[in-house]
Each structure stands twice: as structure tokens, then as C-alpha cells.
Image (cartoon, rainbow, N blue to C red):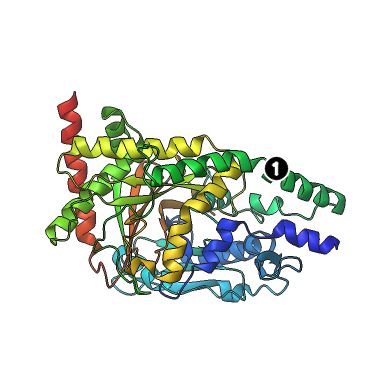
Amino acid sequence: MIEQLYWLMKRLSVIDAAFLEIETHESPMHVANLMVMTIPEIREQESFLLELLDSFCDLAKSSAPFNRKLASPHLLSGWPAWIEDDELDLTFHIRRSAVPSPHGIPELLTLVERLHGTMLDRSRPLWELHIIEGLEHNQVAVYCKMHHACIDGVGGIRLIQSILSESKEGRMPQKTKSAARHEHSPVKQRIGNLFQHIQSQTHVIPELSKTVMEVFKQALHLQESDALLPYMSPKTALNVPISAQRRFFRKSFAFQEIYQLAKALNTTLNDVVLMLCGGALREYLKKYHTLPDKSLTAFVPVSFRNHDAGSDGNKVGVIYCSLGTNTDDPLMRMEDIRKTSSSGKERLRRLSGSATEYFSMFFSLPLLLAQATRMSTLLNPPFNVVVSNVPGPKKPLFLNGATVEWMVPVSALFEYQALNITVMSYHDRMDFCLLACRKALPDLYELSELLEASLVELKQLAGSLV
């Protein structure tokens, strides 16, 4: 009985479990991080790589989520839970790879595209790590992918930060901070935590019911709101059946350039990201004569993870935002984006963390239904594109003495969602990471260049408002 209670405490949240249920071969639900580092000139590359390999092995043996795999608890038959893997095979999870000639970043991104298109083995812990050698300028890359049931974008960055150092002399720890949170506590404490958790969930019902009722009234046109709802999106060339093959591209901007633009426009950094994406997507679809009259809608994850929270699991809310693609006026586009994003965030802001989790699950149900039943072939898509902004480390970081030059997220694609744009800041850069279905969007370079053009347009707008 005690063991069953422990299983119940370790079971996946509703959101985490949903990422397992909606996964298909064409739409694997893992996310990844790609880091490129420069090895110190005084270090011999092979000895550095072997030390790095040993460091990752030591970390994974004793740290969650690396040493956890899926299982079903006794009390809730079929509901997934995490258990420690007593037969963890690190030679399967941690591998050495190499980029082919001419050993540049394009070849690295092509390798990442191939690694990212394959599903993780559910009989093992849901992660893989590749130490990638063969790059020019004494550089090495690390690509680590992990199932979305284990971690969200912000949690992934927290996990990465926990193994990096602000000093060249720092070394990778042998245990992550999140692992310490999963040490076995005394039985009495575990039982107490269980009942405390159950009691806390009952307080969620009133506030959750009120917000859900607001959504239903809005859907029935009984209550006005600027916040968008699912299935208000037009059908576009981005919302087509996808394949398992991927394209990945990184477009980098100076962080201060984007930050100063947000100040000049008197808006948020997140809204500037949406404006850049909206302007680029408008021109991209317009060029191929597939621009709909109605604005595209973005599915925007919003983190509600506390600063003290660990890195595991998903702690995200969801809002739907207009991208203003129905107008060529950047000022009108900005107002449309700002209006819908502010209303969506205000709806989440009124909820507690637990209520936000359940409301986001409710708000994501149309996506889950579309993915499970292929309803997108009959209805308008629940949204057109995922746009996520993940704040990263503000200082330069090091891994076992190597300088981290840049790090970027590699996200996931949903069925009938052929494009994902995930933005991450690191040190003095802000990277727009474009992940797409290779069949639907074979050339992401063109879209990335339109991001540059969209930035120029916003700078002109900011200048006209002075």
C-alpha cells in the first residue's frame, strides 16, 4: 500500500501524460537543445571529448530525469508514472557523432535534422545525448533531446544551466538540482505530501470553473473578449499533413537590438517576437499566393514555473494570439498582437499555478482532439503556428572549460502544424529557431531572411513614432 501511494505521487501530470498520448511517428513529442562550444587551445580535443563523455555519464547515473523511465502504477492502471531505471545503459543514451566535410554549421544543422526526426524508445529513459565532433575552429557541439513529457522549454534551459558554469575553471556537477528534489523522503512525509496535494487541488475548482465559463460565454457570443479561442484560425499552407523529416534553421539577432525596439514601441519583448514572426509569415505566404484574408493565429506557451522550481515536468500556460498577418500596416499589426496577447495573459494571470495547469489542459483539448482524430481535415485548425519565447542565460557560460558560443532549442511539431518558431536569448544574442516539416517547407532560409526584413520594417515604425 505504501509503495502504491509512492507511485501515485510520482505519476505524470495531465499535461505531461498528454504529450505521450498525442505522439506519432510523424509527430514525435521530444524537444532538444543544441550547444556549440570552443575548446580551449591548450586542451587536446580527444582528451577533452573523453572527459566530457565521462562527465555526462557520471551526471546521468544519479540525476533525474536522466535515470527515470516510464511505468504504470498499481492504483491507476494505464496512467504513466516515473520510476528509477536500475538497468540504465549509458552507452545507448550517450553517443559520439561527427559532421561530414566541409565541417561547418550547415552540416551540423543537417545532422541535427536527422537526429531530431526519430522517436525515443519508450522502454528506456526518454532522452539521448550526442557529442558531435568534426567542426571547424576547434569547436564541438552537444545535442540533447528529451521527451516533452519530461520537461518543458524553460525547464530544459534550467537543466542546461545547472550543468554549465560562469567560470572557465568550473566543472560539470555529478548531480542536477532537480535530482535532489526526487530523493526518497520518509514514508510519513510522503503520505502527508500526498494528502496535502489532494487538498490543494480542491481549491482549484471554483477559480477554474469561473474562467472556463467565461470561455464558453465567449464562444457562444454571450461575452466579449479580445482573447482568442481555438478553431478561429484560417486554413493555410502551414496546416497540412506532416512527415517525420525535419528542416531546422537558426536566425540570430543582437539581443539589445530587439530589446531597444521593444522600448521604442512601448511594448513587451514577447510582443516584438510575435510582430517579427507575423511580418515574416505574411510576406512568405503572400509570395506563394497562399496568404489568407484572416490573420494567422499563434499558439503561445507561457511559463508559470517558479524561480525555485526544478527543471522537470511541464509548467506552462497557453494563450492564442493574432499575428496580424491580415494587414500590411505594421502599426495595426502591433496593436492587434498586443491586444490579443494582453487579454490572453490576463486570463491566465487571474489563476493560481495549479488552476493554470488544468485550464491550459482544457484550452489544449482542441489540439489534442485534432491530433488524435484528424479533425483538422474537416475543421479550421485550432491555430496556425507555435511561437514560443524562452529566456536564456544572460552571461557567457562554460562547460568543463569550453566556451559556449551559442545554444538554441529544437522544438516539436504537431500534426497539421508544419512550422514551429522557438526564440531563445543567450548572452548578447537572440536566436529565432525555425523547425519545419521538410515536405511542407523545404527551404527555411527564405523565411529566416524575411525575419530580417520584418525587423527593418519595425525599426522604421519605431522611428516614425518618435
Q: Residue at x 26, y 30 (%)?
A: 265
Mark 1: give few (<14), some (14-19) or many (20+) Cα within 10 Å.
few
Question: Which residue occupies the foreground of this view, 319 or 7?
Answer: 319
* Above or below, 381 relative to 116: above
Q: Is residue 23 left or right of residue 386?
A: right
* Above or below, 81 relative to 361: below
Q: Quadrant for residue 430, please give it.
A: top left
Q: Residue at x 17, y 44 (%)?
A: 327
Res 346 visible: yes
Count of all numbered marks drawn on residues in the image? 1
Question: Which residue occupies the foreground of this view, 447 or 67?
Answer: 447
| Residue 23 drawn at (x, y percent) | 48, 69
Q: Residue at x 72, y 47 (%)?
A: 197
Q: Residue at x 28, y 46 (%)?
A: 323
| Residue 166 drawn at (x, y percent) | 52, 43
Q: Quadrant for residue 444, please give it.
A: bottom left
| Residue 309 drawn at (x, y percent) | 62, 44
Question: Which residue occupies the foreground of this view, 397 or 425?
Answer: 425
Q: Which residue is mark 1?
A: 200
* Above or below, 449 relative to 274: below
* Above or below, 50 relative to 174: below
Q: Is residue 254 left or right of residue 280?
A: right
Res 143 visible: no
Amino acid type, label 1 = Ser
| Residue 437 drawn at (x, y percent) | 32, 68
Q: Quadrant of the C terminus?
A: top left
Could you say whether the residue bearing mark 1 is in a helix, strand or loop? helix
Q: Quadrant of the N terminus?
A: bottom right
Q: Is residue 367 left or right of residue 361?
A: left
Question: Which residue occupies the foreground of this view, 45 or 73?
Answer: 73
